Amino acid sequence: MDSGAEPAGELIRRTQRTLREISTLWGGQDVAPAALRDLRSAEIALRGAESGLLREVSAFDGRGTDGARIAAALARVSALRTEIRDSMLATRSAAMSDLHRCLFRLRSASSLRDLADRVPTEINRLGYRRALFSSLSGRSWSARSAYAYADPELSADLVRVGTAIPGQIGRELPETEVVRTRTPVLVEDAQHNPHVHHRLINLARTKDYVVAPLIGRGEVVGLVHADQHVDHDHVDEFDQQLLGLFAEGLGCLFERVVFREQLGALRARLREQADAVDDVLGGLQGSGITEAERPRQADPLERVDGPLAQLTRRELDVLRHLVRGQSNNQIAEELFVSPGTVKTHVKNVLRKLGAANRAEAAARCHALVRGS
């Protein structure tokens, strides 16, 4: 991700130099932390130095030359903090743009398998060197696809180990927390955490990672893991939020692909049924029996005069099912129409038969057939 701001590494080096300069004002006391891992830790260190300088200013009695040096140092610290905050904001804005592009590319996934295969690659494009996508079944989560920058062998090994030794909800606490709360979790110092999937952690030599839930149809159906951000080799709270947003968007795409696959399967079944009907009709035509010659079972409802004669053919179909005690949804499935259409037909049947309800309509129908 290129935000156009000064590189994070250079800002961190400037922070270290500034903190060393400030230490000379305090008799050589080192005010820099042991390590500045990223811009956030650099900004925190500068904030502490700024507070100390402000205390020096408030206690300054106006004698000597240290006052000018303290004021100059305070100005440098304030300016550097502003640059770091601007850089962090630009980086995060760029990350959100990358997030939208990643999800947009995943919209073209043709199947759930295709979607699962592409997820780790898009996480890499989002700014992470390594990513893992796992499916959740019951209390087990198994690796389905992985990405490791410039290391395809590690990618394959992550899937192999994650499939052979599935994670267990209740055993690995970070993933258990993700499933329980349905929110992303940041895991720090994973190498010394006794409650992680150590086979995967040791294989990838993971120091810290983020895990987020994939939610489909109201349930957690998968997990996405990421570690080693390209800018600073670790992950932090912002990465936790970003991967959480990615997983949330991925859940919407998951449901979209599931719906598309179900729709495709339904269309296939309808085509099979249509082909079967064509085969039957073709067999009848081949037998030499014409429609006029085919015997037709007499329908007692169509032979009755009076109110029943006022019903259309479709209303008679609905009445037959109504007499059997079927609901509107059941009738809709039988006649291949919507429940709303059935409801309209039922209203017309009740009106034409002069019935107040379905039971009365059924009784009226029986009486009219018996009296014919």
Image (spheres, rainbow, N blue to C red):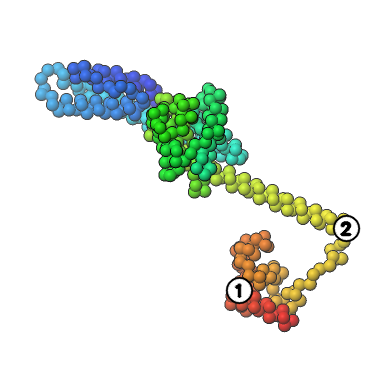
Residue 192 at least partly seen: yes
Q: How crowded is mark 2: few (under 14 residues within 10 Å), some or many (20 or more)?
A: few
Residue at x-position 76% and y-position 76%: 303
Q: Is residue 333 left or right of residue 55?
A: right
Q: Nearer the viewer, residue 364 or 4?
A: 364
Locate residue 222, reporting x and y percent: 51, 40
Q: Distance between the residues labelled 1 and 2?
A: 43 Å
Q: In this view, does 284 lie to the left or right of 144?
A: right
Q: Which of 3 and 295 is in front in this view?
A: 295
* Quarter of the view holding residue 159: top right
Q: Residue 61 carries which label?
A: none
Q: Which image quadrant: the C terminus?
A: bottom right
Residue at x-position 51% and y-position 26%: 148
The count of marks equals 2
Residue 326's place in the image compared with 158, above or below, is below
Do residues under tags 1 and 2 come within 8 Å of each other at their CB atoms?
Answer: no
Locate residue 180, reporting x and y percent: 43, 44
Q: Nearer the viewer, residue 278 or 208?
A: 208
Residue 264's place in the image compared with 15, above or below, is below
* Quarter of the view holding residue 364: bottom right
Amino acid type at circle 2 is Ser
Residue at x-position 26% and y-position 24%: 77
Helix, strand or loop at mark 1: helix
The residue where tag 1 is placed is 358
Residue 293's place in the image compared with 31, above or below, is below
Q: Which of marks 1 and 2 is nearer the N terminus?
A: 2
Q: In this view, does 57 lie to the left or right of 147?
A: left
Q: Which mark is residue 287?
A: 2
* Quarter of the view holding residue 28: top left
Residue at x-position 16% and y-position 25%: 56
Helix, strand or loop at mark 2: loop
